[in-house]
Image (cartoon, rainbow, N blue to C red):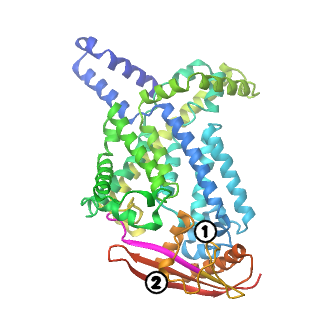
């Protein structure tokens, strides 16, 4: 029904000027309003398809990056065994599938299942099932080690949850090819139109809320409004990405980047308040900014997740050009996919299958719309409380503090502390090596020679540990560093010492060292 109404609205909007004298003014105003809402809340189904492919690929990249430290972060032999997780986050320890076993093979198996689900999501094969499985396994993986997460991880979960209520497989997917062949041209024609409803509003709102809340936080500080924030960020060497150390240290250029990013955040409500080329230009500028972050800063998958989240905002004329550029290649790919899927024995004929499938889909669609509407209201209310725009009701405040779950990336001001980590292992022969990297170090290595972090997740884990120094997590970390350094050095390690090093870049480079602990290592 929503799709039928959308077509009527588009037709009436196109011919409004010629026939307005025959219609009551009120009816014409209502139709113009519907058309305006459609242009802003509706999402082109090809945009949903591009979003689906991007999210599937991001999930695969995320799994690949995490797999490098599978033992370190997700097993009992790593820095956070299940006992330490249960002490810090008992609910996460009970709910995470990845915490059922502390063995590496068990976690690796779940990684493999998640990779298969992510691949199916990208291809659009059994899309809703693939989305649900990906969501459950991603939430479970994040619960297994909450100390390595950043804003991108939280956003990815929200995007998957919102996408579960959207027809992500309606275009450019194995599902679309199979359904158009078995259910007929009516299904294909319906999938040409934009998707609009509470679910599309929820997907768009997830993104705009992140930008809006972060803009509010940055405006409450002084570094962003004073044009100094980006320069402060690039003073933090531990955040440097592949090109981070190569950027020119020109104050006017960095100030322009500060004001430019802040302006994009402040303008982010236009992603839903505008339409057409204005919306496309704003989404494109944010998209390019996030890709540049991936090169300049070590932020894990955050830039990729953010770029994928912007795809649903691009209007139909963008996807018309994309399809035009793909041209015959896309047609050949569709033909090849159709030749494989049409022979599926479950395709018992267009009429029979349509009579069975379409009513069930209509019921699921109505239920999904109601649930999405509830989630949309909850999303807006929660983030309003997190940003301090509205007061949290007493039942909410008694359970959790929404402010602790806000989107405060570099807000209100970037940190002035360049955090590093000093981990030194002493071998049985008296040699000293870096416990994280395995290379030899001088006996009198000064704290200023502390290394940065192997990965963004190591940085997150170690900086959080330096802040609280929880013994339940320090001891397993030192035990893991014993094993890690022995493996890297290829010889027995006698002891490991770990210390957090802080360099205050805003106070003349003052260096502070906080020792986390020392551990005697057992010979292998």
> Can I make out residue 4 in this image?
yes
Q: Magenta segment: does it hold 419?
A: yes
Quadrant containing the C terminus is bottom right
Q: Can you say whether 222 is above or below 208 in the image?
A: below
Q: Residues within 10 Å of mark 2 (few under 14, many from 20)?
A: some
Q: Which mark is residue 513?
A: 2
Between 151 and 393, the one lying in front of the other is 151
Query: Which quadrant of the structure image shows residue 267?
Result: top left
What x and y, as percent, mark residue 397?
37, 67
Q: Are marks 1 and 2 in contact (CB under 8 Å)?
A: no
Q: Residue placed at 36% from the left, 73% from the top?
A: 505
Write the start and end of the magenta stretch as one range: 412-423
The kind of secondary structure element at disc 1 is helix
Query: Which quadrant of the structure image shows residue 171?
Result: top right
What x and y, as percent, mark residue 100?
69, 65
The kind of secondary structure element at disc 2 is strand
What x and y, as percent, mark residue 166?
51, 38
Q: Residue placed at 32% from the left, 30% from the top?
A: 36
Q: Kindly identify which residue carries mark 1.
A: 93
Q: Which mark is residue 192?
A: none
Q: Residue placed at 40% from the left, 57% from the top?
A: 247
Between 350 and 17, the one lying in front of the other is 17
What x and y, as percent, mark residue 116?
68, 47
Please name which of the two marks, 1 or 2, marks the residue nearer to the observer. Answer: 2
Q: Can you say whether 458 is above or below 350 in the image?
A: below
Q: Which comes sooner in the sequence, label 1 or label 2?
A: 1
> Can I make out residue 355 in this image?
no
Between 145 and 63, the one lying in front of the other is 63
Q: Residues within 10 Å of mark 1 (few under 14, many from 20)?
A: many
Q: Magenta segment: does it hold 288?
A: no
């Amino acid at each position: 029904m929503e799709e039928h109404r959308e077509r009527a609205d588009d037709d009436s909007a196109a011919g409004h000027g010629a026939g307005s004298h025959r219609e009551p003014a009120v009816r014409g105003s209502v139709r113009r309003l519907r058309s305006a809402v459609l242009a802003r809340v509706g999402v082109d189904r090809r945009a949903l398809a591009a979003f689906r492919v991007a999210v599937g690929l991001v999930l695969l990249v995320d799994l690949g990056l995490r797999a490098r430290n599978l033992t370190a972060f997700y097993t009992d032999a790593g820095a956070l065994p299940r006992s330490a997780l249960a002490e810090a986050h008992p609910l996460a320890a009970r709910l995470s599938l990845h915490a059922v076993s502390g063995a590496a093979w068990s976690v690796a198996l779940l990684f493999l299942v998640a990779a298969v689900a992510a691949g199916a999501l990208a291809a659009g094969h059994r899309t809703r099932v693939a989305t649900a499985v990906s969501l459950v396994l991603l939430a479970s993986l994040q619960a297994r080690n909450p100390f390595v997460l950043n804003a991108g991880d939280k956003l990815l979960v929200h995007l998957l949850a919102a996408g579960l209520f959207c027809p992500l497989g309606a275009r450019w997917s194995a599902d679309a090819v199979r359904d158009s062949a078995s259910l007929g041209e009516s299904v294909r024609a319906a999938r040409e139109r934009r998707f609009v409803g509470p679910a599309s509003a929820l997907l768009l709102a997830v993104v705009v809320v992140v930008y809006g809340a972060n803009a509010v936080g940055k405006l409450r500080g002084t570094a962003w409004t004073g044009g100094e924030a980006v320069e402060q960020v690039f003073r933090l060497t531990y955040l440097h990405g592949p090109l981070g150390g190569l950027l020119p240290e020109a104050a006017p250029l960095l100030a322009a980047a500060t004001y430019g990013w802040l302006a994009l955040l402040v303008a982010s409500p236009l992603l839903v308040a505008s339409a057409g080329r204005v919306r496309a230009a704003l989404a494109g500028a944010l998209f390019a900014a996030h890709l540049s972050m991936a090169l300049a800063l070590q932020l894990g998958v955050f830039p990729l997740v953010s770029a994928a989240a912007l795809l649903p905002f691009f209007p139909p004329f963008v996807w018309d050009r994309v399809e035009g550029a793909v041209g015959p290649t896309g047609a050949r790919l569709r033909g090849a996919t159709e030749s494989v899927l049409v022979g599926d024995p479950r395709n018992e004929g267009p009429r029979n299958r349509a009579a069975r499938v379409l009513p069930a889909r209509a019921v699921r669609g109505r239920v999904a719309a109601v649930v999405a509407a509830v989630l949309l209201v909850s999303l807006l209310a929660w983030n309003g409380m997190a940003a301090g725009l509205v007061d949290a009701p007493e039942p909410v405040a008694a359970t959790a503090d929404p402010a602790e779950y806000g989107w405060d990336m570099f807000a209100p001001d970037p940190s002035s502390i360049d955090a590093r980590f000093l981990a030194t292992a002493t071998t049985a022969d008296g040699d000293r090596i870096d416990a994280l990297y395995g290379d030899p170090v001088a006996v009198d290595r000064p704290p200023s020679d502390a290394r940065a972090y192997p990965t963004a997740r190591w940085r997150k884990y170690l900086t959080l540990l330096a802040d609280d120094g929880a013994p339940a997590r320090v001891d397993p970390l030192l035990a893991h560093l014993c094993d890690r350094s022995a493996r890297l050095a290829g010889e027995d390690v006698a002891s490991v010492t770990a210390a957090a090093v802080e360099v205050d870049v805003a106070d003349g480079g003052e260096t502070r060292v906080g020792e986390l602990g020392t551990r005697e290592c057992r010979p292998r």
